[in-house]
Image (cartoon, helix red, strand yellow):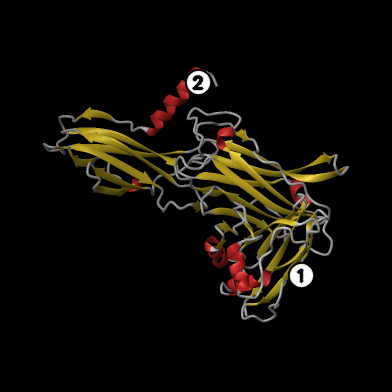
Amino acid sequence: MKLHQYMVLGAALCMGLVACETRESLTENDYTLVEGTGALTLRVDAKEPVSTKAGVSTSNFPVVILNEKGEVVKEYVVKNLPEKVSLEIGKYKVEANSPFELEKVMDYAYYAGNTDFTIINQVVSQAVVTCKRQNCRISLNYDNDFRSTFKSWTITLNDGSESVLSYTYDGTGFASNPADVYWYFEPNTVGKINVHIDAVTKDGQRISDDRAYVKADATQKYDDDNVYFAGGDALDINFTVAVIDMPTEGDLSDIIILDVNLWTESSSESVTIPVEDEVIIPSEPEEGGDNEGTGSDDVQLTFPANANYGSKGTGMPTTADVNIKTPKGLDKMIVKIKGGNDAFDKILIDLTMDGQSFLMSGDGVDVVGNSQFQELLSNFSLSAPQKGVTEYNFPIAVFFTFLNVTGATDAGKAHEFHISVKDKEGNANSGIYKVTIYEE
């Protein structure tokens, strides 16, 4: 962008953010103001990001006028604003916003703005409050290649806070694009968004893919040069697949490709944010069902049948061991858990082992030599795995106590235990065990 273009856009932005305050003297026929007072004519606009075509009505926006002490002196709704607001002389601030509370994750955009103004003795001042969108629009789009390649998937977006966006398609019906979500970022805090996907192809291949998207890496910088995601931004995350050559195996395999396009409030064109991490290549098709291990034959995972039992314990298995064989010596066993209902997701936030979290958005818990996992298992006369062992039975049933107190899983969902194992030579394998609890 040329220098003069930056200057023009910068000037336009400043005009939108700063109050437009002009003054006119009272006419001789205007006797409404007395000594020591003035008046304000006020307009409230919403500055719509260019990536959204629809206009925004401010008629129901609440308006608050505060004095220099921060005390509220006048309150209105935009549609009920008087032609002139009478005020004592002095300095003020006027604030306006959407007629609902701003939350971390919302189904709709939230707008807010404020400006300062001064009331002069027996003068009518004019001010404009320009409300800007405070949250970032997130759109996920699945193309036909993606839909025809995968039969199910779970996608999570993590901005480093406790809130994680999660999208799951279980293979039922048509995989339509999810509705847009509006995500609020604390100012100047979030510069990177992590995208994780677990997907199963139509022929049973399971892949896991982790990507990191950094705003500062965008292919073009805008006039504000902001390296943090902010209100007014929009992220279009597009999922497709490609076929790549794998010389080490001599096969062609599908991988997921994510194109992330960033729109900002100050631009009518999107730019691309490149991926920071490599994908994980999918394994050969699974045998024996969804919960068989996938990956290197040097690391074997044998799962029991997925659990399906009642909320009062009817049909609950007494054991649910995953048999893990690592002939070349166990190195790591990472466990991540996805809750099948909100209650268990809340438990997972505080359920840590040696400072590591089971949450899908994190790095998982390495249970190998984990002292707190050992403490948990000791209640069942069991032991945590140790480095170098060649076989271990991972006892998922010890978690049933936590699952049972949260009741039935949500419709179409299950508690998922994602287990990834690596041996001392770097061979790896992984799989998922599911627990569905029905109401009884």
Q: Residues within 10 Å of mark 1 (few under 14, many from 20)?
A: some
Where residue 139 sits in the image (x, y, percent)? 60, 46
- Identify the image quadrant of the N terminus: top right
Toward which corner of the image does residue 321 lie, by quadrant? Answer: bottom right
SS class of the residue under badge 2?
A: helix
Q: Position of residue 314 (x, y in %)?
A: 67, 81
Q: Which residue is labeled 1 in the image?
A: 304
Q: Regarding mark 1 in the picture, which secondary structure is present there?
A: loop
Residue at left offset 63%, top offset 55%: 167
- Compared to residue 440, the image places residue 114 above or below, namely above
The residue lying furthest to the front in this view is 388
Furthest residue to the right? Answer: 250
Q: Where is residue 334 in the image (x, y as percent from the top left)?
A: 67, 57
The x, y position of residue 284, in whole percent, is 83, 53
The residue singled out by tag 2 in the image is 5
Residue for point 36% across, 32% down:
18
Taking depth in this image into account, of 146 and 111 the one nearest to the observer is 146
Type of the residue with mark 2 = Gln
Q: Which mark is residue 45?
A: none
Q: Which is nearer the eye, 365 or 144?
A: 365
Nearer mark to the viewer, of 1 and 2: 1
Residue 99 vertical placement versus 172 (above, below): above
Q: Which amino acid does label 1 sit on?
A: Pro
Q: How crowded is mark 2: few (under 14 residues within 10 Å), some or many (20 or more)?
A: few
Marks 1/2: CA–CA distance: 64 Å
Direction from residue 407 to residue 104 in the image, left or right: left
Closer to us: 21 or 252? 252
Would you say residue 400 is visible in this rendering?
A: yes
